[in-house]
Image (cartoon, grey):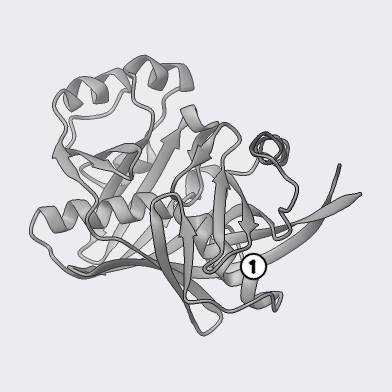
Amino acid sequence: MSRTCHVVRVFTRGDTGGNSLGVVIRSEGLRTLDMQAIATEMGFSETVFLVPGDPPFVRIFTPGREMPFAGHPLVGMTWILRELDVMETDRLLCGIGFVHVGYNGPDAWIEAPPDRPVRVASGADQVAATLGLAAPISATWVDMPIPYLVLELGSPEAVADVNFTEDAMRATGIGELYVYAWVDRDRVKTRFFAPEAGVFEDPATGSAAVALASKLADEGRLSGKVIVDQGDEIGHPSTIELNWNPRRVRIGGSVCMDAARLIDE
């Protein structure tokens, strides 16, 4: 017996780049350890599994663990449910609760709760020094609910030049690191690292974009629109459309179908 894992690229820049995602629509009979094994074998940043229900439940796995929330898997699932004529739904259930979803022409989007806890990150200068980074302009923890360390650097070039080893990051004790810099008022350049999840550098990270919106709101920018560029340094140019207000944070973008792989059981 076999089942299909559809492979899509989420947050593409035109038809290129994006973050690859495995999507398994038929998850009946799969145990948690089966899902984890499939995600590890696929090797993408995440692989997702649809569990029937009203609304449907989406289980999200990196190569290393299950995640309560991640942006690019939920956007990809939203898109593929319509593309394959499985269903059109206005919400999905994940580990943090209900997430509103929808479509903007051919693109897909999700809305995450706006109340992600934000706190100042003490000791961030030492973390940056350990990783060979200049002292950050600001440093914040945002709970997604997994805590992300969000560092604002001084320029897009400083973000592009980030270069450290997985061992160096593990030495800091930081599990997830998001670095960004402003290109202009409405565009940022970003990179995201998560070795504990089995993903040293992620091409496009929707949850980190949500974390950025939470940080900006905490600083007083209560609403806005920002284009998030990511993935260029690892050959996966990606673009996330981020907008937020006090009621919700929306992330969206384009998705491309790549292939269908058979999973033998």
Label 1: few (<14), some or many (≥20) within 10 Å? many
The answer to whether any part of residue 12 appears in the image is: no
Q: Position of residue 73 (x, y in %)?
A: 54, 56
For label 1, the SS is: strand
Q: Position of residue 20 (x, y in %)?
A: 62, 53
Label tally: 1
Q: Nearer the viewer, residue 164 or 99?
A: 99
State which quarter of the image contains the C terminus. top right
**Residue at the spot x=74%, y=58% of the render?**
26
Q: Position of residue 152 (x, y in %)?
A: 22, 43
Q: Does residue 123 appear left or right of residue 59 in this picture?
A: left
Position of 153 relative to 97 (above/below): above
Q: Amino acid at mark 1?
A: Cys
The answer to whether any part of residue 141 appears in the image is: yes
Q: Nearer the viewer, residue 24 or 240?
A: 24
Q: Nearer the viewer, residue 173 or 137?
A: 173
Q: Nearer the viewer, residue 253 or 185?
A: 253
The residue most toward the right is 1
Task: Residue under label 1, please give it.
Answer: 256
Q: Does residue 255 appear left or right of residue 244 in this picture?
A: right
**Residue at the spot x=29%, y=46% of the render?**
180
Q: Does residue 260 appear left or right of residue 171 in this picture?
A: right
**Residue at the spot x=42%, y=55% of the render?**
206
The residue most toward the left is 220
Position of 106 relative to 258 (above/below): below
**Residue at the spot x=92%, y=49% of the render?**
1
Position of 121 relative to 231 (above/below): above
The residue most toward the bottom is 105
Q: Position of residue 246 (x, y in %)?
A: 17, 68
